[in-house]
């Protein structure tokens, strides 16, 4: 896709994703926090901030001073960089990486920082003048009203999961078992120390410099049991409180550059991470959970690959139904996916979700000795996005 673009191994990082209103991140300007956090991550990774010459940021929820966009966030990072903001609901975190790859491939920039973030806590309420309506002012709570109402269909997002479950005849017991298995995968990754390699703790201060708290865990993640899942009330077909994700806050970042610079910046220059292909589709109304599966089918057709040729499969799954539908559509064992955790378990701050998923997927591929990495997910508007990357050794292509 972008033959000259590379993601330098080990120059990435993410905050933990504490659940809505459960941490000090509920009190901060998330754009400022994200910029400062990226600066600390680059420092820890021993990457000079001066190596960056451009910044692509991605978020979906309005934040204070958002008008000033990437240049403001870059100032918080500590470098006066140009850049722009990108947004596509839950696909934002992956689209920002693809956009950075295009910037490098075009020759416009040498080293592009990708920084995605969102804060669902205390999300703003906008007031819109509407002179053509009997209701002269219309308030909109950015997170909750959009989750609850798709203006194109009139349905809530949760209804898309129930509708997809009915279309694919998904069984409630399988969905419960899947959610339990995903939780176990996450806690195993945590026990093994895998998450410590990609997630960073951060101390949050107020404007006076006094500590508000330390962000050092995916707060809101709790162990599940089969009995507890079976006892939960069904909110829609195969959807319960235990088989859907939760709103959260956080940031994630990585770099995109060319092959020579990637080798210079990475602590392991022999690792070569390439962009391979991307696909994006829009499915029928209110069938969002099937969209990622169709996007993956399109990607495999275009690349003449099969799922057997993929080493790491990882996705954004706001509902456990997403994975059950994917397994049916692709004839794929869902137990092979998300081996180090997923957003179903650790939460969904929207903007950075797929960036963290990609970082974890690439780290896992390195542990496996390389191979193709498939990352995919759904987004508002019944959209599915999928991208393929390849992790290998430089010179062994």
Image (cartoon, rainbow, N blue to C red):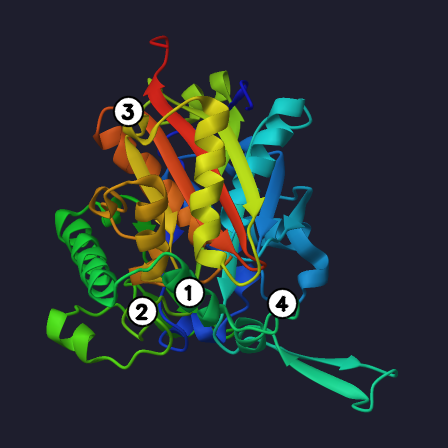
Residue 203: x and y in percent read 37, 64
User: Of callouts 3 and 4, which one flags the residue occurring earlier in the amino acid sequence?
Assistant: 4
Foreground mark, 3 or 4, reads 3
Foreground mark, 1 or 4, reads 1
Foreground mark, 2 or 4, reads 2
Contact (Cβ within 8 Å) of mark 2 with mark 1: yes
Give the Cα separation between the discs numbered 2 and 1: 8 Å
Seen as rendered, the residue at the extreme right is: 131
The circle drawn on residue 238 is 2
Give the Cα separation between the discs numbered 1 and 3: 34 Å
Mark 3 nearby-residue class (10 Å; few <14, some 14–19, many ≥20): many
Contact (Cβ within 8 Å) of mark 3 with mark 2: no
In which quarter of the view is residue 134 placed? bottom right
- Judged from the image, the secondary structure of the residue bearing numbered disc 4 is loop
- Judged from the image, the secondary structure of the residue bearing numbered disc 2 is loop
Seen as rendered, the residue at the extreme bottom is: 134
The circle drawn on residue 161 is 1
Q: Which residue is mark 3?
A: 370
Foreground mark, 1 or 3, reads 1
Q: Nearer the viewer, residue 396 or 234?
A: 234
Looking at the image, is 108 positioned above or below residue 79?
above
Side of 324 where 150 appears, left or right:
right
Looking at the image, is 146 positioned above or below residue 356?
below
User: Of callouts 3 and 2, which one flags the residue occurring earlier in the amino acid sequence?
Assistant: 2
Q: Quadrant of the C terminus?
A: top left
């Amino acid at each position: 896709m972008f033959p000259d673009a590379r993601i330098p191994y080990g120059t990435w990082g993410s905050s933990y994703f504490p659940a809505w209103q459960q941490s000090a991140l509920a009190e901060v300007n998330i754009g400022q926090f994200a910029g400062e956090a990226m600066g600390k991550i680059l420092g820890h990774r021993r990457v000079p901030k001066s190596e960056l010459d451009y910044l692509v940021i991605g978020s979906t929820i309005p934040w204070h001073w958002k008008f000033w966009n990437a240049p403001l966030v870059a100032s918080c990072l500590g470098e006066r960089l140009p850049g722009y903001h990108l947004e596509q609901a839950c696909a934002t975190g992956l689209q920002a990486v693809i956009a950075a790859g295009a910037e490098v491939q075009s020759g416009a920039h040498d080293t592009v920082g990708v920084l995605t973030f969102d804060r669902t806590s205390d999300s703003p309420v906008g007031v819109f003048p509407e002179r053509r309506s009997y209701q002269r002012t219309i308030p909109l709570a950015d997170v909750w009203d959009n989750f609850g109402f798709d203006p194109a269909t009139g349905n809530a997002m949760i209804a898309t999961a129930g509708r997809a479950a009915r279309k694919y005849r998904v069984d409630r017991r399988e969905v419960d078992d899947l959610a339990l298995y995903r939780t176990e995968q996450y806690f195993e990754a945590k026990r093994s120390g895998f998450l410590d390699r990609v997630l960073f703790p951060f101390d949050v201060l107020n404007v006076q410099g006094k500590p508000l708290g330390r962000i050092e865990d995916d707060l809101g993640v709790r162990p599940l049991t089969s009995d507890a899942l079976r006892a939960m009330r069904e909110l829609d077909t195969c959807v319960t409180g235990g088989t859907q994700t939760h709103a959260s806050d956080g940031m994630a970042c990585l770099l995109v550059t060319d092959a020579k610079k990637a080798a210079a910046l990475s602590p392991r220059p022999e690792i070569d991470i390439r962009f391979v292909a991307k696909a994006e589709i829009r499915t029928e109304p209110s069938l969002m959970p099937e969209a990622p599966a169709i996007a993956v089918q399109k990607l495999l057709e275009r690349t003449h690959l099969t799922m057997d040729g993929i080493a790491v499969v990882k996705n954004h799954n706001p509902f456990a139904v997403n994975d059950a539908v994917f397994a049916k559509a692709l004839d794929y064992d869902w137990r092979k996916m998300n081996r180090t955790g997923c957003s179903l378990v650790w939460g969904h701050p929207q903007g950075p979700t797929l960036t963290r998923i990609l970082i974890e997927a690439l780290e896992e591929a390195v542990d496996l000795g390389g191979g193709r990495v498939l990352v995919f997910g759904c987004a508002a508007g019944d959209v599915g996005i999928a991208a393929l990357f390849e992790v290998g050794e430089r010179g062994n292509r």
